[in-house]
Image: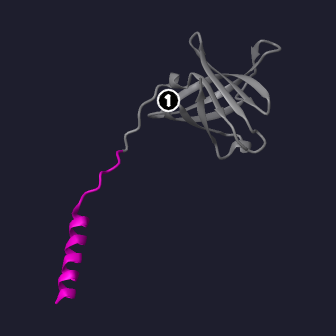
Amino acid sequence: MKNRLLTAAAVCAVLILCACEEPRATNTVPAYPFDTLHGNWIRIGNIGTMGVTKLKSYTNGTEEWMEWTALETTNKLKCNDIKNLRPGLYTFDWQLYDEATSALQPGIFMSIQIAIESPDMIYMKTNSEAMAGGLIMTRVN
C-alpha cells in the first residue's frame, strides 16, 4: 500500500512539474547602429598565424573608415556599400587606401560581415579563406 501511495505521489509531482511553464527566450536582437563599431577592437589568440588582431573604426567626415592590423601590418580601409541586413548585422566592402600614394586602390580588397553582439563584442567574418571561420573581437578602451 505504501508503495502505491509513493508511486502515486511521484506521478503527481512529475505532472505538476511538467505543467510549469518555462520562460521562453525572445528572438529580439538589439538594433545596434553602425556607429556602435566606432572605437578600438582586439582579438588575442591563434587564428591561423594572425595572433593579435586589431580593428579601429571611425568616421572621417561622412565616410566610414577602418584600420585593420594583422601580422603586425596595418591597412587603412574605406567601408563601401554598407548594408544593414537585420538588427545588428552589417555587410560592407573594404577598399584599400594606399598611404604611399594617398589614394584608394581600385576594386574591393575584402568583403566583411560584422554582427554586433553587444556594445563591447563583435563577430567579424570575411570572404578571405584565411579567416573562413570568422573571429570574435572585444572593445578596447
Q: Position of residue 129 (x, y in %)?
A: 72, 44
Which residue is outermost to the top? 61
Residue plotted at (41% across, 38% down): 29
Q: Position of residue 115 (x, y in %)?
A: 53, 36
Question: Residue 104, located in which quarter of the rendered image?
Answer: top right
Question: Which residue in the structure is indicated by mark 1?
Answer: 119
* Direction from residue 5 to residue 49 in the image, left or right: right
Which residue is outermost to the bottom? 1
Which quadrant: the N terminus? bottom left
Residue plotted at (76% across, 25% down): 74
Q: Position of residue 137 (x, y in %)?
A: 61, 35
The magenta span reads 1-26
* Depth order, front residue of 139/68: 139
Name which residue type carries label 1: Pro
Colouring rule applied to residues: one colour
- Asked if the magenta segment contains residue 92, the reply would be no
Which quadrant: the C terminus? top right
Q: Is residue 17 above or below residue 26?
A: below
* Direction from residue 130 to residue 66 in the image, left or right: left
